[in-house]
Amino acid sequence: MSDQTGQMPSFANRYANLASAGLGATVVSATDDFFAEAPRMLADTAPVFIPDKYDENGKWMDGWESRRKRGEGHDHAVVKLAAPAVIRGFDIDTSHFTGNFPPACSIEGCRLPADAAPDGNTVWQPILPIMPLGADSHHFAACDSNEVWTHLRLNIFPDGGVARLRVYGVAHAPDIGDSGETDLASIMNGARIVGFSDAHYGNYHRLLTPTVPKDMGDGWETRRRREPGNDWIIVALGAAGIAERAIIDTAYYKGNFPESCSIDAAFLPNALEAGPDADAMLVTASMFWTPLMGRQTLHADRVHEFTGLGAARGPITHVKLNIFPDGGVSRFKLFGTRA
């Protein structure tokens, strides 16, 4: 399914982008990137157009662009995802490519061991069939496969430019926590955001990443609350586990950090694999979840560690981070062992 309207589909809100250079995704190879280097396609920032910027090969473009093909065949780029993943959707973004976009594309995938790279013997499986592309547009396409993929091959027909490739999905980490303590709330371990009261600023998916925050836009921040209550965000953990300690990082939030926070939790293993319709149910049910951590004072621009959380609580699968009354949190980590 293709959507050139730019309307954000549900999968792009529900799942993190695992073709993110900031999370560790890389371009393994490209048949040609004469005009614009293929790794730019995985940048976390929105693509830009700089009218007067040129380099030795021609007009500088923010994305991947091959030269004009003068023979048979087509160009492709191979991407290693940030983690093995079940994919739920794509965005093939041709922003700013107006007379030099590919007329069509397709995507194939493979699953390889951690230390392996695709070669001439790799068997590629079709994931996204050939779909038309337009100029200067987002092209969203859903994916309903439950296969786990480590590498993708983006084919463009026959040549041209792609500003960004976004691959939305859930990291697959079947051995999470088996060897000791791990971050149960990490995107890289399969955790995801279920819902939130507000996410007006920043990028809420960054809340669960293992990366170091870089600025005030690199985290979850709500608007200023003008009514009673408090803001919150719900996380489905990567696996059922016993939570032992939490990290609440307010890096860069100096005049807008929450006054305090608390954590509620629930054990709902069947909901870990549930579809989008279950998210609304979880948001409602979270009103009745029990405390994992009582209310704790927070400070500006600081890493807060809270220990001794879950030994008596038992296994959990979902948590609700409450902040009082509003504000910004750059990173949330919940360390423990798999149940």
Image (spheres, rainbow, N blue to C red):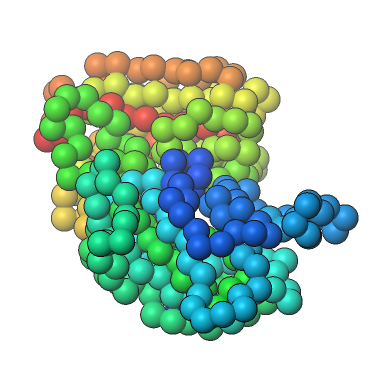
Asked which quadrant contains residue 215, the reply is top right
Tell me which residue sits at (25%, 66%) in the image: 123
Instruction: Please tell me which residue lies in front, 183 or 110.
Output: 110
Q: Is residue 315 left or right of residue 21?
A: left
Q: Is residue 323 left or right of residue 200?
A: left
Between 169 and 203, the residue placed more toward the observer is: 169
Residue at 78% x, 59% y: name it: 58
Q: In this view, which residue lies farthest toward the front? A: 71
User: Horizontally, is 73 left or right of 224 in the view?
Assistant: left
Depth order, front residue of 168/52: 52
Quadrant where the N terminus sits is bottom left
Horizontal and vertical percent for residue 174?
17, 45
Seen from this angle, which residue lies furthest right?
52
Q: Position of residue 309 (x, y in %)?
A: 25, 22
Q: Which residue: 36% across, 64% down?
A: 88
Which quadrant of the figure has residue 86?
Answer: bottom left
Residue 240 appears anywhere in the view = no
- Say above or below: 336 vs 270: above
Q: In this view, does 267 lie to the left or right of 86?
A: left
Q: Does residue 254 appear anywhere in the picture?
A: yes
Of 70 and 297, which appears nearest the observer?
70
* Residue 339 pos. (x, y %): 11, 35
Residue beneath the point at 28% across and 26% down: 335
- Give the total of numbered labels: 0
Q: In this view, does 262 lie above or below 86?
A: above
Counting from the top left corner in percent of width and height, residue 79 is at 43, 55
